[in-house]
């Protein structure tokens, strides 16, 4: 990618990085190269460096360059930080862990990790011989204590966490991981690079489910990895091709299209969430609101230090336990009852029975009276009215 010193602000990067007008036609948007193979000029004579779309595809390349620039603009333009796009967030995670770890290695994971991530560790990579220890990431000493000297290869961080919105200090955990000879991996799905850039805080690799805020329109499933160190990036790229869980051209194009409006969408997600939080905090049927923007939130100071704003995800607990929480979800009308998050439309869900059902009975089980919101871009007065009626 060419160097653009004026392209360090995320709004600009999102629109232009990896997306110079098409050399052949001048098309201002990267075309969807819906193609599997490329004609060669004589054996091994590749015209644009492309031979087969599992290995490389121009639309996917555009997305990959844009992702790298969003997370780490200066090093991406220097060509050191690299992005890689996958068929889903979990495909990206699986590829990352098999590239960085071997059977017999150990990983420290959040004690409230995303349910699918926990299932990958517990039920899939566990059988492969990768061990894990859940730790409370808000406490760097607890993370240091969970490290197995000589065997821990990765400290896995989510911040804010899903669905409890706990906040981990990325810079402090990078020190803990590096002191143990391990890498710090941050799942940046909840914040998006607009609100938080973990590589600039000391993380080695960023993971995304691009299904969520990056795609932003609930119309695509995808994942991404962004790595700073060229050797690590090379190993991840090798495994991306060798394991084959790549993003298809149309999916890559949809994510690129979503990214163009990331900054304006995130600003509105945050302002709408702030109003929802203020209403819930005063509501008699609500016992606790979990949102890093609240001054009383345990992680507020760390969030204020490492995030631009506090995001669109809000969780709360209700009077009346599990039945009451499920009833709130069932009564909501404008908030669509559904899994996933980060789209333009607001969603509501019951983590205990839905997204985090696979963590039941494990150390990662979530409270039964918890409701999770992904606050969307509808008019905030309509969102507030729907929550009022759903709470009854
Ligand atoms: C959704 C999600 C994932 C998994 O991504 P998929 O695209 O569904 O495979 C991983 N981490 C977090 C925080 C998520 O919200």
Image (tube, rainbow, N blue to C red):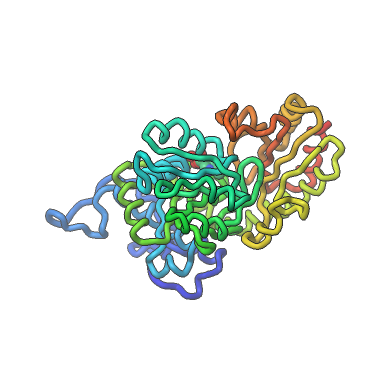
* Residue 127 can be seen in this image: yes
Q: Residue at x 36, y 43 (%)?
A: 98
Residue 226: image quadrant is bottom left
Considering depth in this image, is 126 or 342 the residue closer to the camera? Answer: 126
Q: Is 323 rendered above or below residue 157?
A: above
Residue 88 x %, y %: 45, 41
* View extreme (left): residue: 42
Q: Residue at x 59, y 52 (%)?
A: 141
**Residue 344 relative to residue 380: left or right:** left
**Residue 19 relative to residue 195: left or right:** left
* View extreme (bottom): residue: 5
Q: Residue at x 69, y 40 (%)?
A: 373
Residue 287 x %, y %: 81, 38
Screen quadrant of the N terminus = bottom left
Residue 192 x %, y %: 57, 54
Residue 140 x %, y %: 59, 53
Considering depth in this image, is 104 or 351 the residue closer to the camera? Answer: 104
* Total numbered labels: 0
* Residue 248 can be seen in this image: no
Residue 46: image quadrant is bottom left
Q: Is 80 rendered above or below residue 59?
A: below
* View extreme (top): residue: 323
Considering depth in this image, is 132 or 40 the residue closer to the camera? Answer: 132
Q: Residue at x 40, y 46 (%)?
A: 151
Screen quadrant of the C terminus = top right
Q: Is 253 rendered above or below residue 348?
A: below
**Residue 56 relative to residue 190: left or right:** left
């Amino acid at each position: 990618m060419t160097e653009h010193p004026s392209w360090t602000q995320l709004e600009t990067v999102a629109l232009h990085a990896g997306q110079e007008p098409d050399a052949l036609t001048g098309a201002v948007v990267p075309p969807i190269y819906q193609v599997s193979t490329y004609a060669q000029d004589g054996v091994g004579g590749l015209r644009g460096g492309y031979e087969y779309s599992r290995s490389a595809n121009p639309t996917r390349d555009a997305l990959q360059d844009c992702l790298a620039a969003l997370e780490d603009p200066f090093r991406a333009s220097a060509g050191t930080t690299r992005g890689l796009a996958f068929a889903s967030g979990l495909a990206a995670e699986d590829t990352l862990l098999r590239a960085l770890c071997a059977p017999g290695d150990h990983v420290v994971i959040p004690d409230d990790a995303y349910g699918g991530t926990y299932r990958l560790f517990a039920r899939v990579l566990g059988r492969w011989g990768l061990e894990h220890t859940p730790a409370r990431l808000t406490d760097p000493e607890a993370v240091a204590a969970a490290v197995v000297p000589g065997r821990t290869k990765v400290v896995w961080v989510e911040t804010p966490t899903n669905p409890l919105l706990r906040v981990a200090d990325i810079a402090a955990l990078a020190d803990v991981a590096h002191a143990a000879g391990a890498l710090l991996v941050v799942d940046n799905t909840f914040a998006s690079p607009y609100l938080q850039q973990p590589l600039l805080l000391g993380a080695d690799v960023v993971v995304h489910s691009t299904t969520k805020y990056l795609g932003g329109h609930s119309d695509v499933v995808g994942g991404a990895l962004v790595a700073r160190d060229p050797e690590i990036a090379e190993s991840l790229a090798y495994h991306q091709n060798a394991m084959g869980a790549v993003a298809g051209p149309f999916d890559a194009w949809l994510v690129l299209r979503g990214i163009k409006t990331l900054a304006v969408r995130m600003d509105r997600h945050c302002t709408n969430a702030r109003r929802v939080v203020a209403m819930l905090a005063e509501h008699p049927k609500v016992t606790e609101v979990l949102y890093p923007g609240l001054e009383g939130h345990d992680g507020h100071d760390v969030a204020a230090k490492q995030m631009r704003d506090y995001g669109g995800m809000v969780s709360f607990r209700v009077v009346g336990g599990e039945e009451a929480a499920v009833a709130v979800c069932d009564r909501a009308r404008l908030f669509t009852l559904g899994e996933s998050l980060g789209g333009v439309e607001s969603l509501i869900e019951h983590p205990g029975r839905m997204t985090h059902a696979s963590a039941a009975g494990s150390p990662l089980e979530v409270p039964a009276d918890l409701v999770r919101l992904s606050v969307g871009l509808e008019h905030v007065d309509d969102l507030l009215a729907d929550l009022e009626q759903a709470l009854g």
